[in-house]
Amino acid sequence: MSEEAQKALHWLTVGFISDGARKWVKDVGGQVRELSDDPKLIAVGLAYDPAGTWVWSRGEQQFKRGIEFWSSGEIQEASTSINLLYASTKGTPAEYASAETCYLCLPDEEYDEATGNVKGPGQYETPSTLPPFDELDLDNQPF
């Protein structure tokens, strides 16, 4: 998402967010706010470009707008390239569970219900910025 783009926030409330996920959310312009300690509640504002963006998916261009919730338990957003696990400790999809049982973490992190934390830090690097879609020379360099 370019710095000039108007950002919008999609808000979620969870009981836990890993350090890596917190950093990623903030790095792409989102917000994380502690709401309550008992029960633990955290508001997470996922930043996105409401105008949407073009991306490559399965070998074709697709226009994507907003937050995508996948049945695999992932949240993805194309304009910021954010990809997080969104799940519940109750074994039900997070969108059907009580907020304090839900968590957000990096895709390669494993949440440990016994400790209420991730078992080890995931791999996260500050997202690289790509040139705007219209500046890519896809005719001469499609791959």
Image (cartoon, helix red, strand yellow):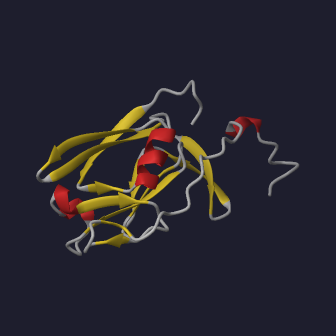
- Residue 97: x, y in percent? 18, 63
User: Which residue is more in the foreground, 128 or 119?
Assistant: 119
| Residue 103 placement: quadrant | bottom left
Q: Quadrant of the C terminus?
A: bottom right
Specify whether 109 is left or right of 36. right
Which one is nearer the viewer's eye here, 50 or 97?
97
Question: Which is nearer the eye, 134 or 5?
Answer: 5
Is 36 left or right of 110, judged from the image as shown?
A: left
> Residue at image x 50%, y 63%?
122
Q: Is residue 22 above or below residue 31?
A: below
Where is residue 71 shown, x and y percent of the image?
A: 36, 69
Residue appearing at x 19%, y 72% in the figure = 90
Question: What residue lies at 32% left-to-right and 72% top-to-bottom?
Answer: 112
Whether residue 1 is situated above or below residue 14 in the rendered picture: above
- Extreme top residue here? 4
Residue 105 located left or right of residue 80: left
Residue at the outermost right position: 140
Q: Within the image, what quadrant is residue 98 found in? A: bottom left
Residue that extends furthest to the left in the rendered view of this protein: 38
Residue 13 placement (x, y as % from top left): 24, 49
Residue beneath the point at 57% across and 37% down: 1
